[in-house]
Image (cartoon, helix red, strand yellow):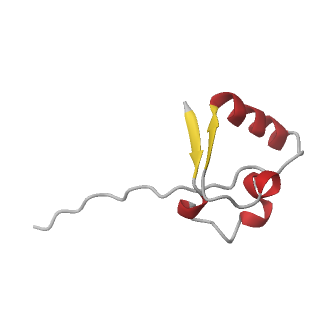
Amino acid sequence: MTTRIDCDSCLVRGLACHDCMVTVLLGPPPELTFDDDERRALEALADGGLVPPLRLVEPVAGPVVESA
């Protein structure tokens, strides 16, 4: 499984960029893709306090409401 990071779709872009691991490591890119090994490595770095945690917040589809 891969984790795709698209800063353009992050719901907290601008609010949390200053201490997001993506910004710290690479600057604010339009989109990144990490595989499972890379994601685990970044989580280990964040857990150890070496980089900030990933602050990506992705939108979730809301419930579908049908009219009566």
Q: Residue at x 81, y 43 (%)?
A: 46
Q: Is residue 50 above or below residue 8?
A: above
Residue 68 vs residue 53, the one in the foreground = 53
Answer with the quarter of the image where residue 37 lies.
top right
Residue 5, given in percent of the width and then of the height, sits at 60, 50
Quarter of the figure that contains the N terminus: top right
Classify residue 17 by image quadrant. bottom right
- For image coordinates 69% across by 71% down, the residue present is 15
Quarter of the rendering occupied by the C terminus: bottom left
Name the residue located 82 percent from the left edge and 56 percent from the top edge. Answer: 24
Judge from the rendering whether residue 17 lies leftward or rightward of residue 9; answer left or right: right
Percent x, y for residue 6? 57, 55
Q: Residue furthest left?
A: 68
Q: Nearer the viewer, residue 67 or 32?
A: 32
Where does residue 28 sit, x and y in percent of width and height?
A: 71, 61
Left/right of residue 2 with respect to residue 52 in the rendered view: left
Q: Residue furthest bottom?
A: 14
